Amino acid sequence: MTDIMTAPAVVKAMENGESADKQPIRAAIVRAAQLARDAEEHARTRQHAKGKRTARERLDLLFDTGSFQEIGRFAGGDINGGKAGSAVITGFGEIYGRKVGVYAQDFSVQGGTLGTAEGTKICHLMDMALELKVPVVALIDSGGARIQEGVAALTQYGRIFRKTCEASGFIPQISIILGPCAGGAVYCPALTDLIIMTRENSSMFVTGPDVVKAATGETISMDDLGGGLVHNATSGVAHYLGEDEADAIDYARTVLAYLPSSSDDNPPTFAYAATRGDRAVAERLGTIVPENDRQPYDVLDVIRCIVDYGEFVQVQELFAPSAVVGLACVEGHPVGIVANQPNVNAGVLDVDASEKVARFVRLCDAFNLPVITLVDTPGYKPGAEQEHAGIIRRGAKVIYAYANAQVPMVTVILRKAFGGAYIVMGSKAIGADVNFAWPTSQIAVLGAKGAVNIIHRKALQKAKEMGQDVEALRTKLADEYEATTVNANLSLEMGEIDAMIDPEQTREAIAESLRLLSGKKRVRRTTKHHGNQPL
């Protein structure tokens, strides 16, 4: 059978009247195959010199061995030296046995720039992925729009933007930035579900260092302007920082293992067998959270005691660390975990943490992953800086995400849940299905000391004027308030908390709740086109 790689050479030979004699055709095939090998070797030389892999080497890392099937290799015809469309590779392969679409930009061919043929190939790939209901992974390494093609190249970005929006929430979309991504091209990955970058070589920015210097006089490097670390730790644009290309691609494979192929499917399930060590792990939960409500602890220790085998895949680990989000399994079923992190700023919700939580809850809701929320927060971060940064607008995104989610939602209050943060972090009032609290948890409008300073302001002022020990009185009043008000009993009596559970019962209670909610159906309550989400 004729190799698909040599198809144009075969056609050319036949057009020249050589079909009667197979020798010229065979020679053309051999020659075309040799040219392809030479081109790949040339690409390897250029990419490896920069510490980067070729597009095809990256595909070998992404897909199960031998599963990749290329499509549209010669789309665009034999123009521009036979290179039309060759700056991007499109096709389908398998990741852990499940079909996934891919487009991989090849920087060794015209700088990976996007022209009309490349844009057409990418849009065709996305159309097929939508029809087949399979995820799409984009391997980005491009100089942007092909200048020689002018507005025709820019038009292709518009087409890709629209296709990406059409696919959003229907099929998972992951972008892996393995080289430059600049100008309008950055919005291709920005519209996808997850962006993965590498510590070296990857960069994203709307305007590059040269433009920044010309416009503002500021001198800045590509890494400092839009490198992998910047977008993972500072801007929040990216969701994972790979140490190298292999690490970045492996993370994409791992995340896809937790997600369904489309929103029409349920997430895959995995075999799980209880072990003798499960009891010891459950008992350890009772020792993690300190009795002193001002003493920090690492919520990751709690999460690892709740999920299968302690395996937890963090998303946006370096951004807004006062909140933790990520993927895990409970009894073999994938779930999304949202938790406050008392180790960082006591687990407060600020503008960045709010957007991080909201975006992740929306991802879980889109792809049918139950949301487990672990609450320990004193509330929203106070201060003019946060107010001016839009804590009202951006904090509302958490409300919108939870209030509109229709996947199973289970919430556990570990220690503190104060004020508005209690309501927005998966409370029953905002839409959670099952809510638990640990016996020592505190639920109130304010913490005891803050509440006493307001409620008993006059009494404290009078004690000060009379020369009494104000601090002793404040402590006494705070203890009384804490005993009568700052606990979960009132919420329990109101039905806002379904049960008070011991820490070691947490995993079992969550698992039972998920089994109960496994048949939960989505309901369309109005005929509206869509809500007007705070953005």
Image: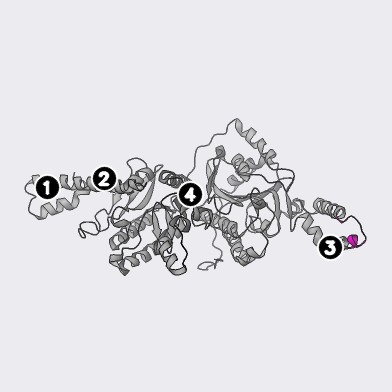
Find the distance from the CA under tag 3 to the CA under tag 1. Answer: 95 Å
Secondary structure of the residue carrying numbered label 1: helix
Above or below — where is 387 with respect to 109?
below
Percent position of residue 519, x then y: 55, 50
Residue 467 part of the magenta segment? yes
Mark 3 is surrounded, within 10 Å at the Cα level, by few (under 14), some (14 to 19) or many (20 or more) other residues, namely: few
Q: Nearer the viewer, residue 209 or 303?
A: 209
Residue 25 is marked as: 1
Q: Is residue 120 left or right of residue 294?
A: left
Find the distance from the CA under tag 4 to the CA under tag 1. Answer: 49 Å
- Is there CB contact under 8 Å for labels 4 and 1? no
Q: Amino acid at mark 3?
A: Arg
Q: Nearer the viewer, residue 529 or 320?
A: 320
Residue 370 part of the magenta segment? no
Among the two numbered marks 1 and 2 on one chain, the one whose residue lies closer to the N terminus: 1
Residue 457 is marked as: 3
Find the distance from the CA under tag 1 to the CA under tag 2. Answer: 24 Å
The residue indicated by pointer 2 is: 41
Task: Report whether residue 83 is seen.
Answer: yes
Magenta-drawn segment: 462-470
Secondary structure of the residue carrying numbered label 3: helix
The quarter of the rendered structure image containing the N terminus is top left
Above or below — where is 391 with respect to 51?
below
Among the two numbered marks 2 and 4 on one chain, the one whose residue lies closer to the N terminus: 2
Residue 241 is marked as: 4
Find the distance from the CA under tag 3 to the CA under tag 4. Answer: 49 Å
Q: Amino acid at mark 2?
A: Glu
Mark 4 is surrounded, within 10 Å at the Cα level, by few (under 14), some (14 to 19) or many (20 or more) other residues, namely: many
